[in-house]
Amino acid sequence: MSRTRRTAIAGTALLAAALTACSGGSDAGSDDKGKDESKPKAPMAVSVNLTGDQVKAGQPVTVTVAEGKLAQVKVTDAKGAELPGKIADDGKTWTSERNAPPGAEYKVEAQNTDSQSATTQFKTGPADKVNKVSINISKGSTVGVAMPVSLVFDNPVANKADVEKQLKVTTSDNTEGSWGWMKDHDGKDRVDWRPRDYWKSGTDVKVDMKLNGVDSGKGGGLFARDYNTEFKIGKDRRVQVSLDTKKMSVTQDGQALRTIPISAGTPGGKKASWSGKMVIMTKEGTIRMDSQTVGLDNAYDKMVDYSMRLTWSGMYAHAAPWNSGNFGRTNSSSGCVGMSDADAKEFFGQSQVGDLFEVVGEGSKGQAPIGNGYGEWNLSWDEWKAKSALSGAPQNG
């Protein structure tokens, strides 16, 4: 007589009968000494915490064996991608390292140390609310030495530590840096990764955001995908504007390139320039500037050439030929750093997004909030690390 292997599923239990030996051929009258004493192994029974076709996403998968120990567990989606996980030291449970994301179908295959196995599957339902990420550096870009990695979230992020744990920066030279949380200028939650010191030219950087299935917390919803980007650090260009001398100095790789006469913001009110360390955020070229959009009533409305953004609130470096009589003499702009067409054209052509742009001297309206642009360089390293949701622990890439 033979016994067949059979798998049964009841509730959350996953059962697999073992391969068993055949019982012997002695007749009923023979004594016990002639019998095959082997007995079938008890069926393997494991439970999976997620079952059914509409499982709530955003939680880890746990597989638990009723008897014996687990030897291997594989949880794969419809495309064959595995959900990574680990078996506990006691061999009783396997837990995935990542949450099950929304709208996914998974197959669970478990094997114990007696080579018994069992299989089941489940599907996660759609997320009630999906959170998304905007990344400031596009894939394949080359940026300046002051450019941070900046992630802005569509919805609030209450579970900041859970999200930050899934963010990883890898660099070609083990650059030390840390994530720091803040509010973006528009009020959305934002997290930036800043090196301890400015980047070194030539560094290759990769950013992996394994957020699929992570719960943002109250009001934020689940992330429904992973994100990534990679970029390179270009020339070490730094700019310093002196409000005192009304001049802008440009260096590259530590060598002075040129000094440009400028006119910055008018001291003593809303038209004063921001001071401190900023970053060239974007090179926008010819744009319309309307003073009403930045709270300066009808001060101006004109097309402006060679524009480079320094803050979200509207401070730029750009050509300002209408103010030529004040270059190098008087700070009389509405907050931006203006220069001649010729100087602006050359400066624009040589500048990189991510170049350091520092404003020093008297007559500013102070430093902009760190979320109004990339103002994290105005903080000490310890102050910056303290903004991490993981106690400011540095992350080496």
Image (cartoon, grey):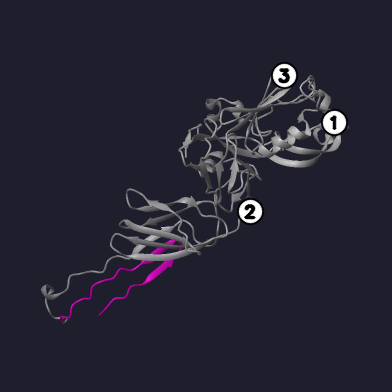
Q: Which of 389 and 337 lies nearest the eye of the viewer?
A: 337
Q: Which of 118 and 376 lies nearest the eye of the viewer?
A: 376
Q: Residues within 10 Å of mark 2 (few under 14, many from 20)?
A: few
Q: Which of 205 and 109 lies nearest the eye of the viewer?
A: 205
Q: Please identify the quarter of the rendering in which residue 276 is found.
A: top right
Q: Is residue 16 magenta?
A: yes
Q: In the figure, 95 relative to 198: above or below?
A: below
Q: In the figure, 134 relative to 308: above or below?
A: below
User: Three-letter amino acid code at disc 2?
Assistant: Asp
Q: In the figure, 35 relative to 279: above or below?
A: below
Query: In the figure, is residue 278 to the left or right of 20?
Result: right
Asked if the residues shown at circle 1 and circle 2 are in contact, with their CB atoms under 8 angstroms apart, the answer is no
Numbered label attached to residue 163: none
In the image, which residues are magenta?
A: 1-26
Helix or strand or loop: what does disc 3 sit on?
Answer: loop
Task: Identify the residue shown where x is 81% and y is 23%.
Answer: 326
Q: In the figure, 353 relative to 97: above or below?
A: above
User: Three-letter amino acid code at disc 3?
Assistant: Thr
Mark with earlier residue (3, 2): 2
Mark with earlier residue (1, 2): 2
Query: In the figure, is residue 202 to the left or right of 353?
Result: left
Residue denoted by label 2: 128
Which image quadrant: the N terminus?
bottom left
Task: Identify the residue shown where x is 58% and y is 48%.
Answer: 140
Numbered label attached to residue 322: 1
Magenta-drawn stretch, dominant element (helix, strand or loop): loop
Q: Residues within 10 Å of mark 1 (few under 14, many from 20)?
A: few
Q: Please identify the quarter of the rendering in which residue 156 is found.
A: top right
Residue denoted by label 3: 245
User: Three-letter amino acid code at disc 1?
Assistant: Trp
Disc 3 vs disc 2: which is toward the camera?
Answer: 3
